[in-house]
Amino acid sequence: MFWLIAALLAAGALAFVLPPLLRRRGDPDPAARDATNIALHRDQLRELETDLAAGTLGREQYDEARRDIEQRLLDDVRNGNGTRAAPAAGRRSAMAVAAAMPVAAILLYLAVGNPAALAPGAANRDDHAITREQIEGMVERLAVRMKENPDDVKGWTMLGRSYAVLDRHAEAAAAYVNAVKRSEPDAQLLADYADALAMARGRNLKGEPERLIAQALKVDPQNVKALLLAGTVAFQDKNFKSAIAYWERILKVVPPDSDIANSVRDGIADARKFAGTATAPPSAKPGAVAAAASVSGTVRLSPGVAAKAAPDDTVFIFARPAEGPRMPLAVMRKRVRDLPAAFTLDDSMAMTPAMKLSGQRQVVVGARVSKSGTPTPQPGDLEGFSAPVKPGAAGIAVLINSEVR
């Protein structure tokens, strides 16, 4: 189709360029042209006769001039005033233009266009789609670069976030340590470090993660992630009033219709219920109570990696936000021998009351075969993920088909 359209455009351009080159120049009617030439020469003869009669021109001069006019008249009538020889040159020019224009267009396209897009199946490929293997390759190259340039704070921060995206939380925490050591106090960096460290310790926020959270809030009392984690620590300690206080501060700085605002309102409602003050939080919209939602489907193990899994290996099935913090919203546990296994994840399985599945616009469902039996991914674990889905989706298919590196 591309080449057909290109050919039509080239033909249209040539249709404007070639006709003037092929057209015979001068009057297209030979008889009319000859009559004009004869009349012109007759006038010249009449002027010669007038000059001869007036005595301004001698007989010899008159005869010579008359012969010249008669000869020119014969030549013009015979050769068409030289214009009939012109089409040969015009045809040569037309042929050159007809050949050069398409060649020039193709060379220009090869120089500035995208010839690869013309390959069969190119329209069905997403050139911007990045596979997990490509991401892991880029992360490993970044890790090598950081060994060569250890004082690059931004590089360590990027490496930590990259490891977190890959659920390699222990390595993320190690990268964040290097960034924290080399930077001025940064609330977001401290909160990210606390989150990665807690995930690497089995989602335990007590101890060093809790200290990092407090330090982040000293730097920036309005940091959303630090407030979220601080409220979670307080909720787990059954200090519900403190949890409510932390989470209500989040509602003052995030858009009221955002996913995190909806989840935080749910968390506040739960904290008030457990605290015995089940009244609506002052920042909540009237009647804005997120409906319970769930996601369900089936987890299968790909035959390509099945040999690497033992029947008693633990399988973690979880849902996490498609965007934002990667903390799991709900988790359940199975065994490899149970696969393929049906699953249903809902708010009753929430890891923290401020981050619920029902408060998200989209979630990703994942499944991981854990060799160590812990939820933190380790090299050699097997995993797979769904595409982003909305809470309430059913029939989700999760295929465990890749190995954690």
Image: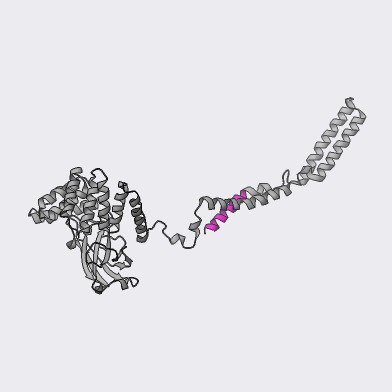
Q: Does residue 127 appear left or right of residue 189 in this picture?
A: right
Type of colouring: one colour
Q: Is residue 216 magenta?
A: no
- Measuring from the top left, give residue 352's x and y in whole percent: 17, 57
Report the front residue among 141 and 266: 141
Quadrant in the picture for residue 32: top right
**Residue sitting at x 84%, y 31%:** 47
Q: Residue 54, how many percent across, how many down? A: 88, 25
Residue at the (92%, 29%) spot, across then down: 59
Q: How many marks?
A: 0
248 vs 130: above or below: above
Residue at the farthest top position = 55
Asked whether the viewer can see residue 220, the reply is no
Give the x, y percent position of residue 398: 30, 67
Main secondary structure along the magenta-highlighted residues: helix
Residue 4 within the magenta-colored segment of the rendering: yes
Is 129 situated left or right of 300 in this image? right
> Looking at this view, is 182 or 253 the one in front?
182
Is residue 258 visible to the viewer in this orientation of the structure? yes
Q: Which residues are magenta?
A: 1-16
Q: Quadrant of the C terminus?
A: bottom left
